[in-house]
């Protein structure tokens, strides 16, 4: 069985959703807030030197980190008709690889740098400046991605892929869905379709529970 180090709503949701899609049983250990809990970081550092999520322990005990590596690893073991990665060499796979790596190499680092700028700079003003710069750059990157999303229903057209899981999860993060709705309608529509995938409903509920409504 796989074991996933996780935290609801964090990058582990990328792996959790793919494991659910493939019907792979998984033990989930929520580690806590890595930016607030030294204990959470220390616990994760034993298996991932960067203390990052997702961190996946494979059934044979080996450790996989890096969400794109996890995505390709799981697809290698999936049946062709269920695969979240186009496996045949050609245009669809090339397009998939380009944008998968774009997401993890360009957009994901804006969170790594911007989530807690006190890791890199002293002083509130420089920290805020860096955070603002990361937010602005991220928005620019998302507009680039929006420019390549067609009419769907999915990133690759008719084929549902791991890119749709990334978009569905990452559009929950800053600048969040209202910004995507106003500025990148293609990505927003895709994310809403991703929210509605029945096989992923339980994962989305666990990671992005609807806000509690006031009683009475
Ligand atoms: N390149 C990594 C990035 C993972 C990442 O930055 N995860 C965030 C959570 S969403 C994290 O663990 N941040 C803690 C940190 O950077 O110290 C991947 O694609 O898996």
Image (tube, rainbow, N blue to C red):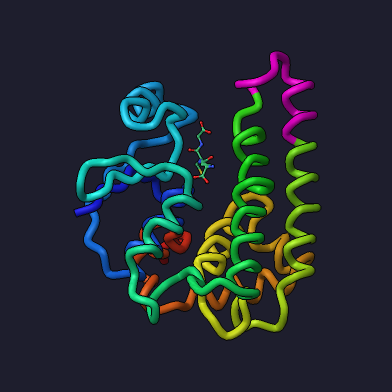
Magenta span main SS: helix
The residue that appears at 57% across and 74% down in the rendered structure is 192
The residue that appears at 28% across and 44% down in the rendered structure is 57
Report x, y in % for residue 62: 27, 41
Most extreme residue toward the front, as rendered?
89
User: How many callouts does the rendering have?
Assistant: 0
71 relative to 132, above or below: below
Report x, y in % for residue 167: 59, 63
Picture quarter containing residue 153? bottom right
Report x, y in % for residue 61: 22, 41
Left or right: 118 with respect to 144? left
Residue 129: in magenta span: yes
Name the foreground residue: 197 vs 104. 104
Which residues are drawn in magenta? 118-131
Left or right: 181 with respect to 27? right
Left or right: 171 with respect to 194? right
Report x, y in % for residue 29: 27, 43
């Amino acid at each position: 069985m796989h074991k996933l180090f996780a935290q609801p709503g964090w990058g582990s949701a990328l792996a959790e959703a793919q494991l659910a899609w493939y019907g792979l049983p998984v033990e989930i250990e929520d580690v806590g807030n890595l930016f607030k809990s030294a204990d959470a970081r220390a616990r994760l550092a034993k298996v991932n030197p960067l203390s990052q999520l997702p961190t996946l322990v494979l059934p044979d005990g080996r450790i996989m980190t890096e969400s794109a590596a996890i995505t390709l690893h799981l697809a290698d073991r999936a049946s062709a008709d269920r695969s979240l990665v186009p496996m045949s060499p050609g245009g669809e796979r090339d397009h998939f690889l380009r944008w998968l790596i774009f997401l993890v190499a360009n957009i994901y680092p804006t969170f790594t740098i911007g989530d807690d700028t006190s890791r890199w700079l002293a002083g509130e003003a420089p920290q805020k400046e860096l955070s603002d710069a990361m937010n602005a750059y991220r928005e620019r990157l998302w507009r680039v991605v929006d420019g390549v999303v067609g009419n769907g229903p999915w990133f690759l057209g008719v084929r549902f892929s791991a890119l749709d899981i990334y978009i569905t999860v990452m559009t929950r993060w800053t600048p969040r869905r209202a910004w995507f709705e106003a500025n990148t309608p293609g990505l927003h529509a895709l994310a809403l379709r991703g929210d509605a995938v029945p096989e992923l409903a339980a994962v989305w509920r666990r990671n992005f529970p609807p806000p509690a409504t006031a009683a009475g």
